[in-house]
Image (cartoon, rainbow, N blue to C red):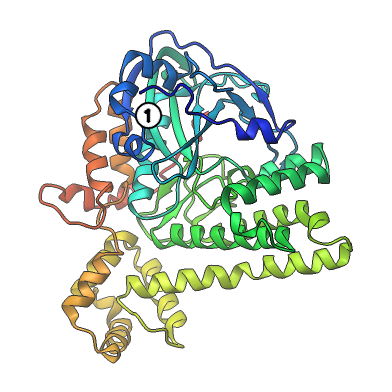
């Protein structure tokens, strides 16, 4: 079974003016590097065909399935606080949309496929290493139960990409609920006005929130829905120590999925000021800033929707402002519920916020590994420095009257033992870029079953706190 006739082009049909039709650059000697057979099955695709020469030609962009109309999407974006009115897919193409086995519409997207009208002087290419990072991180997040785009395949192009040095080129075939972003609405507003914003909003509602379609006040409801899913998303990032690294408005999705794993990483030593991105010199996107940043990004979405929310501008601002202010409670509800689960607690208590904040302050003071500490809590024996806090915590546990074994099992079901440890990620990507995929496959085996301790995987549970000092990641462009 090929992809011929399987890809819809609803974005192209419904949102003329929000894209440019574009062809991928021809890859000289494509070879399959990674194929996500589990995701292929979810999409109802034939993995054997995808791995064939004909399938690889499609995955790298050399061939276009019958009926598909590849395009580069247009969007704007606040990048580190500064507004760029014309960004767009500078090295990516939307091949089209397909129905998965559950009947849900998913984008099939190529990243690293060459220059487009939005390249802004870039070469449009990607290197093997960053594309393998996106594959790894997406699968790890998916296994943790956090909404995310996912990689279907990584294909090497056989060509070299010029960065600080010459690197092997690659194309990532990515799947998403959609690639609609806050920046999509910003582009529509700046370049086309309210009519286009309404078209984009209606497209987003039909795609992600169809229950809102017939509502009065559906555009305010759309803002509320996106605020809710983004509050939940970022809270879940925080609960596993994930730092996105580049939370521009063009990387804030309308679907509530994590997108664009560039300078991202999981925190080892707990510190709210943790920054990994080599270009985030002022810490705008530090771990502890992520909730306030996504709230700021949502305010930018609200600005584009104001003419649709109410004809009277002051009333529109009042309604939208209430939603944006409500982000804090939405985030805190998800965060606190998640922290209770990590601590083995079920019922809410008035002292929970203080209990959690005191624990995080101790973790920071002691310089401990975030993931390792929470995983070890199921033994009910935190280090001596935590004695006073431990007494309060265990008293709280006893008050719920649950069996300790039951509590430990529940805690181990939400506190991962395996995450993509930064030193292991670098080891795997370096090897993968040089053609040795064994370390990457081993790391993937660990992080795609993150909660189940297994023999032979001890090193994947261990932090390297010395290596964590000064660790940096890069955007890959």
Residue drawn at 42 percent across, 40 percent down: 100
User: Is 342 drawn above or below residue 432 in the view shown?
Assistant: below
Q: Position of residue 203 (x, y in %)?
A: 66, 45
Residue 58 position by quadrant:
top left
Q: Crowdedness of circle 1 by 10 Å Cα count: few (<14), some, many (20+)?
A: many
Of residues 350 and 384, the one nearer the viewer is 350
Relative vertical location of residue 432 with respect to residue 182 in this rendering, above or below: above
Disc 1: which residue: 153
Rendered position, 28 above or below 430: above
Residue 229 visible in the displayed image: yes
The residue shown at (54%, 21%) is: 67
Task: Give x and y (percent) for residue 403.
Answer: 19, 83
Percent position (x, y) of residue 378? 22, 71
Question: Would residue 200 appear left or right of 465 to someone viewing this image?
Answer: right
Asked if residue 396 is positioned above or below residue 385 in the image, the reply reads below
- Could you say which quadrant of the image residue 397 lies in? bottom left
């Amino acid at each position: 079974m090929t992809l011929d006739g399987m890809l819809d082009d609803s974005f192209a049909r419904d949102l003329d003016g929000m894209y440019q039709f574009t062809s991928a650059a021809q890859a000289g000697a494509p070879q399959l590097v990674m194929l996500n057979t589990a995701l292929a099955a979810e999409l109802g695709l034939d993995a054997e065909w995808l791995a064939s020469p004909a399938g690889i030609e499609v995955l790298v962009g050399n061939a276009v399935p019958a009926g598909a109309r590849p395009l580069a999407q247009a969007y704007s974006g606040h990048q580190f606080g500064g507004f760029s009115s014309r960004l767009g897919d500078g090295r990516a193409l939307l091949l089209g949309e397909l129905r998965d086995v559950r009947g849900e519409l998913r984008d099939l997207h190529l990243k690293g496929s060459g220059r487009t009208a939005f390249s802004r002087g870039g070469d449009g290419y990607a290197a093997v290493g960053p594309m393998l990072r996106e594959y790894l991180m997406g699968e790890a997040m998916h296994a943790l139960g956090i909404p995310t785009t996912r990689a279907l395949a990584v294909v090497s192009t056989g060509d070299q990409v010029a960065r600080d040095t010459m690197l092997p080129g690659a194309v990532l075939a990515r799947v998403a609920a959609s690639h609609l972003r806050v920046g999509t609405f910003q582009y529509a507003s700046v370049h086309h006005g309210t009519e286009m914003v309404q078209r984009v909003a209606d497209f987003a509602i039909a795609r992600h929130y169809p229950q809102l379609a017939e509502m009065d006040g559906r555009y305010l409801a759309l803002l509320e829905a996106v605020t809710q899913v983004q509050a939940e998303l970022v809270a879940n990032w925080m609960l596993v120590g994930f730092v996105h690294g580049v939370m521009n408005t063009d990387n804030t999705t309308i679907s509530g999925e994590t997108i664009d794993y560039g300078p991202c990483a999981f925190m080892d030593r707990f510190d709210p000021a943790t920054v990994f991105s080599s270009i985030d010199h002022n810490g705008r996107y530090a771990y502890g800033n992520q909730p306030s940043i996504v709230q700021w990004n949502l305010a930018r979405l609200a600005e584009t929707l104001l003419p649709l929310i109410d004809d009277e501008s002051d009333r529109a601002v009042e309604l939208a402002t209430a939603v944006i202010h409500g982000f804090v409670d939405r985030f805190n509800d998800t965060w606190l519920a998640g922290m209770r689960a990590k601590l083995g607690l079920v019922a809410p208590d008035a002292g929970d916020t203080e209990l959690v904040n005191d624990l995080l302050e101790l973790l920071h003071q002691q310089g401990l590994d975030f993931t390792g500490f929470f995983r070890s809590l199921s033994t009910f024996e935190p280090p001596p420095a935590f004695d006073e806090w431990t007494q309060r915590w265990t008293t709280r546990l006893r008050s719920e009257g649950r069996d300790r074994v039951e509590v430990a099992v529940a805690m181990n079901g939400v506190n991962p033992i395996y995450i993509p440890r930064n030193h292991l990620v670098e080891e795997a990507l370096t090897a993968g870029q040089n053609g040795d995929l064994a370390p990457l496959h081993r790391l993937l085996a660990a992080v795609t079953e993150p909660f189940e301790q297994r023999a032979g995987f001890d090193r994947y549970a261990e932090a390297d706190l010395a290596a964590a000092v000064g660790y940096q990641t890069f955007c890959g462009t």
